[in-house]
Amino acid sequence: MRRVLVCALVCLAGFRVTAGWVQRQVLVRSPLASPVRVRGPSTRQAVKEPSPELGRAYSVAGAATIAAWVACAIVALTRHPTLKLPVRHQCLTIAQALAPVPLAAYVFMSLSRSAGKEGWWAMGRSTYRRLNLGVAAVSLWLAAAVIFGPSFSAGYKLYSANFARVISATHFATAIFCLTVWVRVVNPSSPPRALSRLVRGIIGSIWGLMPQTSETGTSSSSGSASQLDDPDSPAGSDGRNEYAVASALFLWFAVMPNLVGFPLATVPTILGKSLSRAASAWTFLAAVVAYVLKDASQRGRIHSGTTFRYLRHGLIASSGAHLLLVAVKLAGIDGGRAALRQFYPGALACPKFALASLLMHALVVFAALTPLAKVAKKASAAVVAVSSDTTVAAAPAAAPAAAPTAAATMSVGQRVSWNGTPGTIRYIGPISLAPGQWIGVELDSGRGQHDGTVMGVRYFTCTSGAGGVFAKPEQLKIEA
């Protein structure tokens, strides 16, 4: 274990954090004006180039983190501080504690692969920023669970002093590494700026747990106005609803064990008093991954690259293993009904919470196993990175497919009305959230759905604030 820690610290500190950054201007072709040169809020722009050192650092951090958790599970669960337990029960409990390992492995694989292939540019994307913060939070929580062991395990002292120092140092190294990457790609001007950005991001993510769609101005083929409640519409069948509910449930069950006492605190992970509160860190990581997949579904990117496939596989493997082990125990492998009452009093005392936690795992497995069918890519606008957070949509490189008849008579700057509200056309073309031709309109009332930016992509600018909407051509009426 000491050798693993030394290798981790050397590798995490040895890569060049400044590699892959250049100063440059970006040429943006706006659909509304002539080409202009735009310089983002930070002129420090990541170049999309491989970074093998960064990828290897993630691999080492992942191996060290997983090894540290496996060691903790084995040490903490091979013996009970007060009871003599059968070997069969100990093996099943250790297996239950190791159920999150596939999810952790796939998360680190995603970070390592993307960093190795696309370097710092990839780490600046919202998906990887969230994963880095999620891993950092998990590592800090696991380190605290080892250092303050008795506070996490109902007064039991599970680890020796030397063991606790090595394990906590491993988790701290991973947390510092991931936070360093996040700070580097976000590039805040000062520590208070980084903290305020982090707080706003967390609050925004909690608010963003609700699934969203850009098709709120249209009705589905079945007549649903929201689209989200129609399983036949893309918004209702791509998994965003399931991932949103699963993410909220994972978040609740990650926080709950640390707010309530035993036996209720043992319900989500079914690990008893020894590791239930420490293992809630992995429940939080599952919440982050479910949120990332919800966001990818909303953006139509669930089939993009290998990252989201890895994350789906991680949820399937970890939640599937958890459900399988619970089914094995209910089948009597752990000693029958008498053993269930003896070994799992917490779950039996809180059956509704136990059932909700199982439904949570079943829901995320269902969502990950049934993604929306992949559709052929259509010609879309090129997107040029302006900063680590914002992109600007450029004009299509090639002529788009034949537009509907209604769109053929429309042009940027033309006056139209949407649902009886007058406005001005600011954008005509494809958008990333839905196929087909869309019209971006700035409403005179200023009471729209956005300011021309959707999911980080700016299609037009509203002078009246959040007065922008996207609509299909047939939803608009040309004013005389």
Image: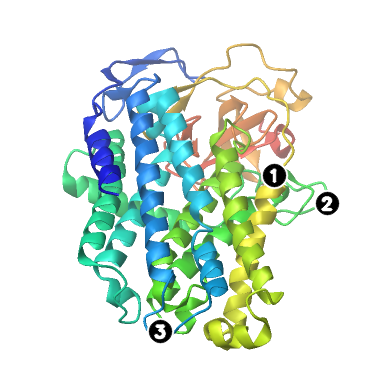
Q: Which of labels 1 and 2 is toward the front? A: 1
Task: State the mark number for residue 261.
Answer: 3
Residue 325 horizontal/vertical position (percent): 62, 66
Circle 2 SS class: loop
Q: Which circle's residue, 2 or 3, is located before the other in the chain?
A: 2
Give the answer, above or below, for where 336 lies relative to 116: below
Between 396 and 342, which is closer to the camera in this rendering?
342
Residue with the mark numbered 2: 222
Q: Amino acid at mark 2?
A: Ser
- The amino acid on which the numbered mark 3 sits, given as a three-letter code, is Gly
The amino acid sitting under disc 1 is Pro
- Residue 371 is labelled as 1
Question: Does residue 6 appear to the left or right of 276 in the view shown?
Answer: left
Calculate the distance from the C-alpha at mark 2 to the C-alpha at mark 3.
47 Å
Residue 310 badge? none
Foreground label between 1 and 3 = 3
Question: Which type of secondary structure does the marked residue at label 1 adopt?
Answer: loop
Extreme residue in the right direction: 222
> Disc 1 or 3, which lies upstream in sequence?
3
Asked whether the residues under the numbered discs 1 and 3 touch, taking CB atoms below 8 Å apart as contact, a structural biologist would say: no
Task: Say which residue appears at 44% left-offset and 12% top-offset.
Answer: 34
* Residue in the image at 68% along x and 24% along y: 377
Visible residue check, residue 413: yes
| Residue at 57% from the left image edge and 23% from the top image edge | 412
